[in-house]
Image (spheres, grey):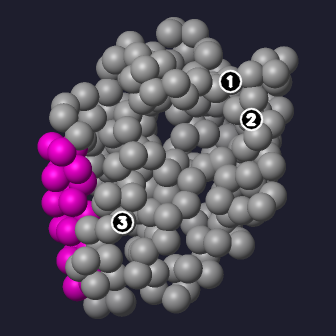
């Protein structure tokens, strides 16, 4: 089963995923954690380019293609082999991040992005998409307080609001594929909701005849 966590900056994905993975393992499943951009030797090198504050001149088009290159490597080197072994894959961001950030955030044509995403991923779609939703100002404040700040964080408030609105647009067009969780609450409450959501999805996935 392939599960992705998405959300605006500061939504807590990175800190929540390891705890969620431990819970899934306790349920008897093998779990693989990965992140975007990165997750492979090549992808991590691309990540360094994308997050570096020295690369503010990076254009939206170049940014998009770098994200897609890292994702293409991740899918074929890591995600597809793990899924073939029956492993539960948890990814910190995936294709919807490109639609939200480069599409809604930067204004790159969404139809073009979807074609590029299909090429980069080979059409691989998550079984479950979780949006950890948080107010933009609150999320960026969290990032600042944690001392984590990169090139993407440094975009304008208006950009980040477009990203958040973009995620909600994606949810509204495919509500059956998404679960939205309020990430502005205490982390324990968010984790509890994540566990309930994933437990339900795992049961449903396991009960399908084709599985």
Q: Which residue is mark 2?
A: 50
Main secondary structure of the magenta stretch: helix
Residue at 68% across, 53% down: 38
Residue at 52% across, 24% down: 147
Packing grade of label 3 (10 A; few <14, some 14-19, many >=20) is many
Magenta-colored span: 188-207
Packing grade of label 1 (10 A; few <14, some 14-19, many >=20) is some
- Residue at disc 2, secondary structure: helix
Q: Quadrant of the N terminus?
A: bottom left
**14 in the magenta segment:** no
- Mark closer to the chain start, 1 or 2: 2
Residue at 61% across, 64% down: 123
Q: Which residue is mark 3?
A: 21
- Residue at disc 3, secondary structure: helix
Per the rendering, the mark at residue 18 is: none
Is residue 113 shown above or below 70? above
- Residue at disc 1, secondary structure: loop
**Residue 89 on image: x %, y %:** 47, 69
Q: Which residue is mark 1?
A: 151
Q: CA distance from mark 3 to mark 1?
A: 28 Å
Q: Are marks 1 and 2 in contact (CB under 8 Å)?
A: yes
């Amino acid at each position: 089963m392939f599960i992705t966590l998405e959300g605006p900056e500061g939504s807590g994905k990175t800190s929540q995923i390891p705890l969620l993975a431990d819970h899934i393992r306790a349920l008897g499943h093998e779990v693989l954690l990965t992140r975007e951009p990165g997750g492979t030797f090549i992808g991590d090198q691309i990540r360094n380019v994308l997050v570096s504050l020295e690369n503010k001149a990076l254009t939206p088009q170049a940014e998009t293609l770098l994200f897609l290159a890292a994702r293409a490597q991740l899918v074929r080197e890591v995600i597809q082999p793990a899924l073939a072994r029956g492993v539960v894959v948890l990814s910190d961001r995936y294709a919807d991040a490109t639609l939200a950030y480069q599409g809604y955030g930067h204004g790159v044509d969404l139809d073009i992005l979807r074609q590029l995403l299909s090429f980069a991923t080979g059409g691989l779609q998550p079984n479950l998409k979780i949006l950890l939703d948080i107010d933009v100002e609150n999320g960026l404040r969290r990032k600042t307080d944690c001392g984590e700040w990169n090139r993407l964080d440094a975009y304008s408030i208006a950009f980040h609001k477009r990203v958040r609105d973009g995620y909600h647009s994606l949810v509204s067009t495919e509500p059956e594929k998404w679960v939205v969780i309020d990430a502005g609450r205490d982390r324990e409450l968010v984790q509890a909701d994540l566990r309930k959501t994933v437990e339900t999805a795992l049961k449903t996935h396991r009960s399908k005849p084709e599985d």
